[in-house]
Amino acid sequence: MQVNDMLQILGADPTQLPPAANPPARPEEAFARVGRTPQPCVACGEPATATRIANVPGVGPCWIDTCTPHMIAIAKTATSAPGSEALTALRAAVRQADVDVALLTVPLAEAECPRG
């Protein structure tokens, strides 16, 4: 997803985002933003549970802190989820091989797992 599209979904003003170092965020920096005293979500002001650094056109690298609902909103709206190209290629190969498979995107509950 393009940064401008993400900011539009969030309704965030790019000029109001906190400046950051170049991406990617270092784990300790990210934890400091969402840890004990989380930064406010750029969309609603609730405590952030996720953060990222993005190169905002015309502004430069900025922190984009989001609460869980806004993080999910961005993920659901993304037109191309990370790894989707790999899954598309895998699906095509499986169909070509005429193999019966199942791809799990969530872990099985213990009762559902044949190995226990």
Image (cartoon, rainbow, N blue to C red):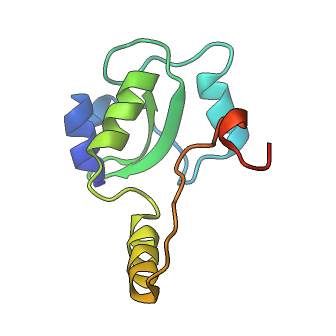
Quadrant containing the N terminus is bottom left
* Horizontal arrangement in the rendering, residue 29 relative to residue 22 (left or right): right
Q: With 91 as the anchor, is 80 left or right in this view? A: left
Residue at x 30%, y 49% (from the top left corner): 78
Question: Is residue 39 placed above or below 6 in the rendered structure?
Answer: above
Rendered location of residue 10, percent (x, y) = 26, 30
Q: Name the one closer to the observer, 33 or 61.
A: 33
* Relative height, residue 52 to residue 58 (above, below): above
Q: In the current view of this chain or complex, which residue is farthest to the bottom?
A: 96
> Residue 49 occupies which quadrant of the picture?
top right
Please tell me which residue is depicted at 45% across the width and 17% down the height of the picture. 40
Q: Does residue 30 sit above or below 78 in this rendering? A: above
Q: Position of residue 34 (x, y in %)?
A: 60, 24
Quarter residue 30 falls in: top right
From the top left corner, tell me how far across and down residue 79 is, in percent: 26, 55
Residue 13 showing in the rendered view: no
Compare residues 19 and 81 and report the one nearer the observer.
Answer: 81
Residue 7 position within the rendered picture, expressed as x and y whole percent measured from the top left: 26, 38
Residue at (46% x, 29% y) in the render: 65
> Which residue is the extreme one toward the right?
116
Q: Residue at x 50, y 41 (%)?
A: 52
Quarter of the image for the C terminus: give it.
top right
Examine the rendered structure and indicate whether residue 28 appears above or below residue 69: below
Q: Is residue 91 visible?
A: yes
Seen from the viewer's position, the closer of residues 107 and 41 is 107
Q: Nearer the viewer, residue 27 or 87?
A: 87
